[in-house]
Image (tube, rainbow, N blue to C red):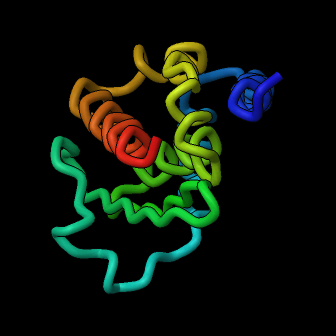
């Protein structure tokens, strides 16, 4: 089982503990609150992700063939989505990122429970991650 598959399985198990979507949303918000802060020099237009209704910044660096992402948002639910994205894609090789299925969010039920604008933002973040991985692959 790949690390992305394992992360997906863990997330599915964690989400199964909650009986309703209000509790799942609160869990997602709590995940976002646990994100490490980003240095102010990365919270700039250079790192801002276009296509997100809320402000989202993603900074990356590659060391020894592994991509590391730091990300944050000014919106609580979006910060939680970032936390999920990072669990799936952070600290992996570009090849591993590109081989990671994008259906985790559908499996979690997020695509049907997020507003269209939040879904667009989520896809903009995923597109950025995949585009970055393609640059280094």
Q: Which residue appears at 35% of the width and 85% of the height?
A: 40
In screen coordinates, is 62 left or right of 128? right
Residue 121, compared with residue 56, is above or below; it is: above
x, y percent for residue 7: 73, 34
x, y percent for residue 56: 30, 57
Q: Can you name the residue that lies furthest to the bottom here?
A: 40
Q: Which residue appears at 22% of the width and 32% of the height?
A: 117
**The one of 121 and 95 positioned closer to us in this rendering:** 95
Q: Which residue appears at 43% of the width and 48% of the height?
A: 136
Q: In the rendered image, which quarter is residue 95 located in?
A: top right
**The one of 15 and 48 positioned closer to us in this rendering:** 48
Residue 57, compared with residue 27, is above or below; it is: below
Q: How many discs appear? A: 0
In screen coordinates, is 95 left or right of 8? left
Residue 45, compared with residue 113, is above or below; it is: below
x, y percent for residue 61: 47, 66
Q: Is residue 30 visible?
A: no
**The one of 24 and 65 positioned closer to us in this rendering:** 65
Q: Is residue 95 visible?
A: yes
x, y percent for residue 114: 37, 26
**The one of 117 and 71 positioned closer to us in this rendering:** 71
- State which quarter of the image contains the N terminus: top right
Q: Which residue appears at 50% of the width and 30% of the height?
A: 98
Q: In the rendered image, which quarter is residue 59 located in?
A: bottom left
């Amino acid at each position: 089982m790949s690390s992305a598959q394992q992360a997906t399985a863990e997330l599915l198990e964690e989400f199964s503990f909650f009986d309703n979507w209000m509790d799942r949303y609160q869990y997602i918000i709590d995940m976002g609150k646990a994100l490490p802060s980003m240095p102010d020099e990365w919270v700039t237009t250079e790192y801002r992700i276009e296509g997100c209704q809320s402000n989202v910044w993603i900074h990356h660096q590659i060391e020894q063939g592994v991509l590391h992402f730091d990300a944050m948002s000014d919106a609580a639910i979006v910060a939680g989505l970032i936390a999920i994205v990072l669990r799936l894609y952070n600290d992996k090789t570009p090849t591993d990122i590109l081989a990671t299925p994008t259906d985790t969010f559908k499996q979690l039920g997020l695509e049907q429970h997020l507003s269209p604008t939040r879904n667009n933002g989520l896809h903009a973040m995923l597109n950025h991650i995949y585009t970055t991985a393609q640059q280094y692959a």
